[in-house]
Image: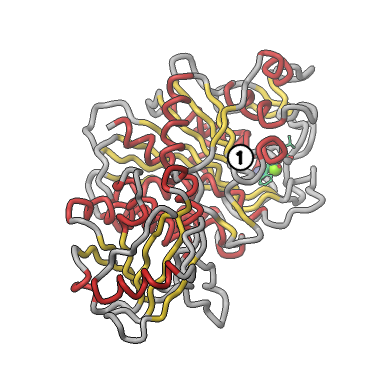
Amino acid sequence: MKVIKNLNEAKDSSSLVYGLFNEEQMVKINPEVDEYLSKLMLNDLISSDLGKVTTIHTFDKCQFNKIHIIGLGKRSEYDFDKQAEVFEKVSYKLDRKLTIDVASFAGDLNLEKTAFDLVTAINYNCYAFDQFKSKKQDTSISVNYLISEEYKEVIESAEKISQAIKNTRDLVNLPYNHLNAEKLANYAKELVKRFNSKKVNIKVYNKEEIERLGMNAFLAVNQGSKDEPYLIYIKYNGKDEISEPITLVGKGLTYDTGGYTLKSSMNTMKCDMAGAATVLGVLEAVLSNNLPINLNIVIAATDNRISGEAYLPDDIITAMNKKTIEVVSTDAEGRLTLADALTFAQQEGSKHIIDIATLTGAVVVALGNYTTGVFGNDQEMINRFLEASKKAGESAWQLPITNDIRKQVRSSKVADLTNSTGRNMGASSAAAFLEEFIEEGTKWIHLDIAGTAFDQNKSGGTGVMVKSVYNYLKSLV
Ligand code: BES
Ligand code: MG
Ligand code: ZN
């Protein structure tokens, strides 16, 4: 990646990429080719329809072997959604060595956001999870961003965030036999070590220590596992030692079989630690960009499976905050691990929490695979988050926690709470359950990414919400 001020600096590049509106009569690249391209345009050989890519071979008429003209449609109708569609076309598939005229893709839209979104889109498009394939798919690319000097920092920041998203995707894609709780904890340790800063510290609690903390809901989920659970706790004092931290809690189920309430189809459930991967991705983005905030990360990591030791439906467990829970379904395990993780976060002094979890199939039914479910107890915080996600170009939608569903969560005949209510409002009932572990005075939002974190038909892990949560944190600075 290189930021360049003019095309003379692009000697190493074989392709130029340029965005063209319907209204443009002329491509303004360089006198040698402008006339040639204008003729092609006049003869309708170059299309400016939205998303259309026309590749022109220049036959040595200019320094580039190829010019890719990407149609932007009508300038007056161009918005960030259309721009995102256009950016899907920019990848190694055009060429390995691209020079991109960034301003040509902005139109009347904000150039800074255009530059940021372009960089993250290219990195997103140039991803393959191929570390276990003998024959690798080459997705490498080298890009020159042609843009004025003042946007250099934006582009560099976008590159760092892209790297964090890539790592998030890789983590989500790792299957259980390559990523159990211990390995996830080791990954977190390595990540912290890499930044080699006194401002960031990690503590990983083992089973004995988790027992001493009284995290019995978390431990119940781990009971059937052959692997020990780990509680991952990271503190970053990017601001100072005294300000209250914001805490990100990530669901860290390295595999979810459902337990004795066995899933009839459990394929892709390696993705059940996507919340954990996301909060680690946000941490990486925060550290590499030196965001001046106090940020804590909490992950209760385990898998959920069957053995002679496994917890059973009907079990009654006492969570860390002493509330008792009737286990109606061992497959509603995420909320059990999160319950104790939320209690832990608050005991550590956090009154401002975001949890991120692949929590319910119901959120997929409600919102599908491209919209994340948002819940919370503080409308101002929710609004701020929705604004941040909009800016990130990640679709998110608020769903309610109603008194009716709260009542159902409290309707167990034998314990304070039930971990599973009926079929209706499943995403809300999970959120209402989590809310039981949020203390008076704590601001909290819950992101259900069960539908959005993993795309089976594409590259698996999506890294969804890294950008949104990062934007949210940035908005607090
Ligand atoms: N990990 C699943 C949720 C999930 C579903 C993640 C689809 C990714 C894609 C979660 O632990 C689960 O099993 N939830 C149950 C809850 C139910 C038993 C109350 C569900 O949604 O069916
Ligand atoms: Mg489950
Ligand atoms: Zn799960």
Residue drawn at the location 63% of the way across and 39% of the way down: 359
Q: 168 or 452, which lies in front?
A: 452
Position of 450 with respect to 42 (left or right) is right
Query: In the rendered image of this protein, does residue 422 appear above or below residue 406?
Result: below
Amino acid bearing label 1: Leu
Q: 355 or 150, which lies in front?
A: 150
How packed is label 1: few (under 14 Cα within 10 Å), some, or many (20 or more)?
A: many
Q: Name the residue under label 1.
A: 219
Ligand 2, seen in the image, is in the quarter at: top right
Q: 52 or 335, which lies in front?
A: 52
Instruction: State the residue lying farthest toward the right.
Output: 264
Residue drawn at the location 29% of the way across and 45% of the way down: 200
Q: In which quarter of the image is the C terminus?
A: top left
Instruction: Give SS at disc 1.
Output: helix
Quadrant in the picture for residue 414:
top right
Can the viewer see residue 369?
yes
Cβ of disc 1 within 8 Å of ligand 3? no
Q: Where is residue 47 in the image (x, y as percent from the top left)?
A: 49, 64
